[in-house]
Amino acid sequence: MKHSGQRGHHGLASALALCVLVPLVGCSQPAAAPAVSEPVAPAAASAPADSVPPAPAANASLPTADSQVVQATVKGLMDAAYGASHYDTARQCWTHAFETPNDTLDYCMKPAAPQVVAGADGAQVYLLAYSDPSADSYSQVDPGLKGLMAASLSADGQWKAIASSPAIDAGQAGDCGCRDARLQQVGPGLYGWLASEGGVWQGVAVIRETLTAPVGETFKQVATIPDTGSDGGKLALQVDAQAAATAGFYPLVVTRTGGKAAVDRKVIPFDAGKGVYPWTP
């Protein structure tokens, strides 16, 4: 529900070919798999969730995504992000009002399937939340929302937040277009979300590939790479998990195919001073 005005915001959502050098669906490069439990949709008490692409093979030392401790962590993260009192039992989502310079939009946030990974100090839970575009009436220029959260699990089953960004605008028409985002290892004991973002405005598709990872207590977009080069060639993004990390982040590799230029490969190390992967076409 809009409270005032129209929002002239541009979100982004679509697809880019990408492949990470750690194993994931559709990848051809062999590499050692990070320990990640198979994602399972949250229990009804925490609202049903859509599945995300399968994570690497399960590790017996990690709690499963449908375990009581992980489900309690999912509910705790969602309650902390949006407010326990904002849970809508009828729609099985957490309501959230997102303010823009021109208006306030109401969203219905749902958790995707949690993913459990092996962090530097034990098990960690990463969670993506997404806005339900059918929960309200949105115009084409109204963005969707995604929430990114992570928590560590102690041996006694208690959880502690690592980072949380509950409301990141993305996509259009109330749909973040983020449910196919993939959790990947981007550094030793560090994971981030790779997502294709974009949209179509006046018949023109604008597409980019983003990498968002914990920096401090929030998630930060540390890389933004277009899917098409200036010469029309296609750009594919990889994370080189075999290389040495800089400030906790592995380097990225961008490969160009097609277009006027020959196939080439560009390595982008993490810039610790700027806190991002600087991209220059």
Image (cartoon, rainbow, N blue to C red):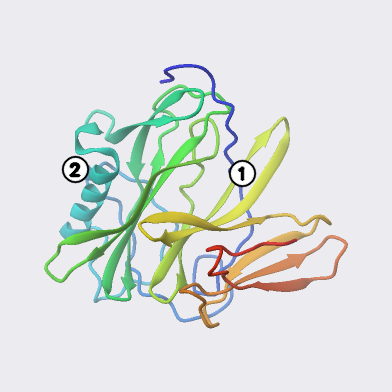
| Along the viewing direction, whichever of 42 and 238 lies nearer the viewer | 238
Quadrant where the N terminus is found in the figure: top left
Which quarter of the picture shows residue 206?
top right
Give yes or no for contact between labels 2 and 1 (Cβ–Cβ under 8 Å).
no
Question: Which quarter of the image is occupied by the C terminus?
Answer: bottom right
Residue, x 45% and y 57% (percent of image)?
A: 53
Q: Is there any visible trace of residue 56 in the rendered image?
A: no
SS at mark 1 in the image: strand
| Mark 1 neighbour class, 10 Å CA radius: few under 14, some 14 to 19, many 20 or more | many
The reply to whether residue 153 is in sight is yes
Mark 2 and mark 1 lie on one chain; the one further toward the N terminus is 2
Please name the residue that numbered disc 1 is placed on: 198
Amino acid identity at mark 2? Ala
Question: Could you say where residue 2 lies in the image, as x and y percent from the top left?
Answer: 44, 20
Q: Secondary structure at mark 2?
A: helix
Q: Rounded to the nearest whole Å, what is the CA distance between mark 2 and mark 1?
A: 33 Å
Residue 159 appears left or right of 176? left
Front position among marks 2 and 1: 1
The residue that appears at 86% across and 66% down in the rendered structure is 261
What is the x, y in percent for residue 195?
A: 53, 54
Q: Name the residue carrying label 2.
A: 45
Circle 2 residues within 10 Å: few <14, some 14–19, many ≥20: few
Q: Is residue 41 above or below residue 97?
A: below
Location of residue 7 (image quadrant): top right
Q: Amino acid at mark 1?
A: Gly
Residue found at x 57% / y 69%: 271
